[in-house]
Image (cartoon, grey):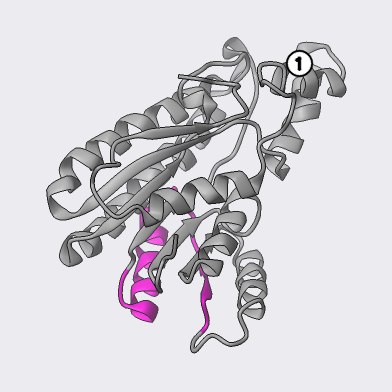
Amino acid sequence: MQLDSKVSLITGAASGIGLGIARRFAAAGGRVAIADLRLDAAQAAADAINADHPGAAMPVAMAVAMDVSNEDAVNAGVAAVVAAWGTIDILISNAGIQIVNPVESFAFADWKKLLAIHLDGAFLTSKAVLPHMYAQKSGTILFMGSVHSKEASPLKSAYVTAKHGLLGLSRVIAKEGGSKGVRSNVICPGFVRTPLVDKQIPEQARELGISEDEVIKKVMLGQTVDGEFTTVEDIAEVALFFAAFPTNALTGQSLTASHGWSMT
């Protein structure tokens, strides 16, 4: 599947899954705006992608500073992409964090911070790009959900709540946008070995009173069919499939890629 110079805005794309998607989209002929809280990291990622495509007529990647929980920052970032490339065809709402604690000791400030990044960020970026998509009568919005969009795990009340919420937001956008040529879907990865997951391993080991090896083998991968992590490349291929899909036949859906961790 090819993207034929379509413009993608990918949040949290300076590293991890977001960067993997950006690289795959650029390889498929798309242009990618690397949006991240850290502009220096976003610029380094964009520079690396451009270096991989030296024969391109114009740069295939650009960097955008964006705090997805801040409406002004989101609107400014979207405006910068539109000013550079004329439109936004694809939004990948990927920015996220993880905080683990049991409910009774989960700080309310941490709860609000996590939901602001995952849910407010998804809402604000969608709100900002939809007028451009509606004007051209085409567009794709993809939310980065999780197996925790459909399942629950101890210590992750805010994360599970946020990821469940993305399913609802995506379905509403699919209903509202369908007649205007806009599709919305959710990608639900299993555990992907990224810095976000690496950070969870010692945290969960402490909270659960088990070794880090047990966290990996029993908590993270114990429900998979083969004991394997999902890869960044796996998720990038799913994102490309959704982004390049040609019709409204595939909208308001979620697809789980988790080595069988979740089969709903």
Where does the C terminus fall, quadrant-wise? top left
Instruction: Pinpoint residue 76: horizontal percent, then vertical percent.
Output: 38, 67
The image shows residue 110, relative to residue 61, as above or below, that is above
Magenta residues span 59-87
Instruction: Pinpoint residue 146: horizontal percent, then vertical percent.
Output: 52, 31
The image shows residue 20, relative to residue 259, as above or below, that is below
Towards the viewer: 98 or 175: 175
- Residue reaching furthest left? 179
Instruction: Pinpoint residue 224: horizontal percent, then vertical percent.
Output: 66, 21
Element on which disc 1 rests: helix
Q: Residue at x 19, y 67 (%)?
A: 136
Towards the viewer: 101 or 90: 90
Left or right position of 171 against 152: left
Q: Is residue 68 visible?
A: no
Left or right position of 139 against 213: left
**Splitting the image into 4 quarters, where does residue 253 fall?**
top left
107 in the magenta segment: no
Left or right position of 186 against 247: right
Where does the N terminus fall, quadrant-wise? bottom left
Q: Residue at x 29, y 36 (%)?
A: 252
Q: Is residue 60 visible?
A: yes
Type of amino acid under label 1: Lys
Instruction: Pinpoint residue 165: horizontal percent, then vertical percent.
Output: 38, 29
Determine crowd level at label 1: few under 14, some 14-19, many 20+ residues with C-alpha closer than 10 A: some
63 in the magenta segment: yes
Q: Residue at x 75, y 24 (%)?
A: 227
Q: Badge 1 is on which residue?
A: 218
Towards the viewer: 258 or 65: 258
